[in-house]
Image (tube, rainbow, N blue to C red):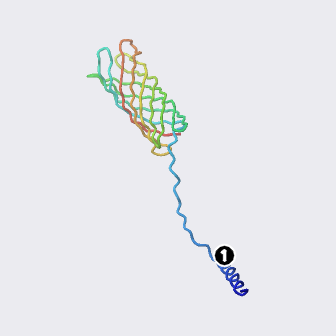
């Protein structure tokens, strides 16, 4: 009995020593990609935009179409999925009546934006102030309000593209003889700083 017990202890100790002294088994580790994070919309941003407009001037009414292009800049604050911010866009272009065409010296929109972030997309609604200056035989200007909605999509952590609809109602005019309303669709591309 003693011999059997002694033999079992010796086999157990030598077997353990052999395992302990043997090389470690090779385990191949496969690197995992880090999980993709949702876009961060917090901070300053800027970019370029271009769009088409249609509208009318009353009394008349006189219908017009316009092609505009310009730049925008703004700041967003993000808390969870909610995004709030301000943006200013400045554009120039051509305003086409039937038949004359006039230059848009400057179209400026100052907007407050409220948005909802979903993954890499930002859905937003906006509202604010608009002003336009037009070169005709006389100086023409109009001021009023705007509302709109759009979508920005983050291509990378810094670059985004988007689209936006803006309605403008500008009853405060120089000379004070007309009202101006317009609908516009705009495409945009920007960089987050």
| Whether residue 1 is situated above or below residue 51 in the rendered picture | below
Q: As drawn, which residue projects farthest toward the left?
A: 99
Residue 40 percent across, percent down from the top left: 52, 41
| SS for dot 1 | helix
Query: For residue 162, which quarter of the picture?
Result: top left
The residue at the point 68 percent across, 81 percent down is 14
Q: Residue at left 38%, top 24%?
A: 104
Residue 49 place in picture, x, y as percent: 41, 34
* The N terminus, quarter of image: bottom right
User: In the figure, is residue 154 to the left or right of 1?
Assistant: left
Front residue of this view, candidates 148 and 138: 148
Residue 161, horizontal then vertical, whole percent: 43, 40
- Asked if residue 167 is positioned above or below residue 45 in the image, the reply reads above
Q: Name the quadrant containing residue 3.
A: bottom right
Can you identify the residue that label 1 sits on? Answer: 20
Crowding at mark 1 (Cα within 10 Å: few <14, some 14-19, many 20+): few
Q: Nearer the viewer, residue 84 or 109?
A: 84
Residue 192 in percent (x, y) is at: 51, 39
């Amino acid at each position: 009995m003693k011999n059997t017990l002694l033999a079992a202890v010796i086999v157990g100790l030598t077997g353990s020593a052999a395992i302990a002294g043997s090389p470690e088994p090779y385990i191949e580790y496969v690197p995992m990609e880090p999980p993709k994070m949702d876009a961060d919309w917090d901070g300053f941003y800027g970019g370029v935009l271009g769009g088409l407009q249609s509208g009318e001037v009353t009394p008349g009414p006189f219908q017009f179409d316009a092609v505009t292009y310009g730049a925008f800049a703004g700041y967003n604050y993000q808390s969870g999925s909610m995004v709030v911010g301000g943006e200013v866009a400045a554009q120039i272009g051509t305003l086409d009546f039937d038949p004359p065409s006039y230059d848009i010296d400057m179209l400026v929109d100052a907007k407050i934006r409220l948005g909802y972030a979903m993954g890499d997309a930002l859905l937003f609604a906006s509202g604010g102030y608009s002003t336009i200056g037009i070169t005709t035989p006389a100086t023409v200007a109009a001021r009023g309000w705007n509302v709109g909605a759009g979508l920005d999509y983050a291509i990378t952590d810094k670059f985004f593209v988007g689209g936006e609809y803006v309605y403008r109602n500008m009853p405060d005019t120089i000379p004070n003889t007309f009202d101006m309303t317009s609908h516009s669709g705009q495409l945009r591309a920007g960089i987050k700083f």
